[in-house]
Amino acid sequence: GPAQVSTVLAYGRPQGRGLTPETAFSEDDEPGPTLSQYAGSKAAGDRLALAAMQSGEVEGCVVYLACCIGRDSKLLDPQRDVMRIRDLIEGNIPAIITSQAVFTYVYVKDAAKAIVRAAEKEGNGGGERYLVGDQRLVTNEFYDLIAEISGTPRPRFEVPAWLALSSGVVSSWWGRRVTGTTPTAPADLVRTAVGGNFLFDVSKSKSELGMTYTPVGVALKEAVEYIRESESQAPA
């Protein structure tokens, strides 16, 4: 049956789960509270889809993807690239948010493979759920890896989480009401970045979908190369 594609952020962090490797949540845990408005809106759609699947009204499953990295057109669109990879490798971000949170990434080709395999798998049309992606990085490691691959030094300044959140709230309001543009640090993004670890177990996608996951360094290298290729081909 068809696969509803969602994000692990929409799964939310189940009660008492996801903050340490030992408490990583799985598909056996009921979804928990989300960290952002974006994730909350996705979660609402997932609940509607799952209810229809579990009642037999429609066939299908839900695939929850980690943060996708690789050759992806959204990297060229500042409105869609929430990770700001292009800005990072061009040196356009003066400061980053201080955060020891661990996030999980998945190579775009692995994500596509998981979606196809989930959709084609026999017997999972009643709302089976799959968590996809196992490449974990502390936020600081993410910035260091981009700097290493791109050759662009990481931003020099770090903003404390409490200040980033208050500034993000103000800049989101200012952006919506006054300038009509996306602020440098939207409050939704800041809340996610400082929301603490978000760890989950992907044993099910490995055993049922036969997934093996590409190292995040390979995915980030492809992302940086894609951005640079696109820039070199852009009209002067």
Image: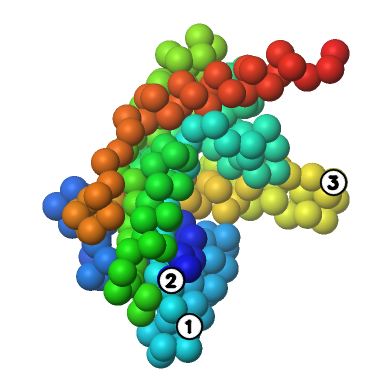
Front residue of 211/197: it is 211
Say what amino acid the circle numbered 3 marks. Answer: Thr
Ranked by sequence position, the earlier of labels 2 and 1 is 2
Quickly name the residue at label 1.
Answer: 58
Q: On the rendered structure, is 73 left or right of 200? A: right
Is residue 128 positioned above or below 150 on the image? below
Quickly name the residue at label 2.
Answer: 1
Q: Nearer the viewer, mark 2 or mark 3?
A: 2
Which image quadrant: the N terminus?
bottom left
**Residue 125, horizontal then vertical, whole percent:** 37, 75
Say what amino acid the circle numbered 2 marks. Answer: Gly
Q: What residue lies at 33% left-to-right and 33% top-to-bottom?
A: 214
For disc 1, the neighbor class at 10 Å (few under 14, some 14 to 19, many from 20) is: some
**Residue 7, horizontal then vertical, whole percent:** 46, 57
**Residue 107, horizontal then vertical, whole percent:** 42, 37
Q: What residue lies at 63% left-to-right and 17% top-to-bottom?
A: 228
Residue furthest to the top: 151
* Contact between labelled residues 1 and 2, with CB atoms less than 8 Å apart: yes
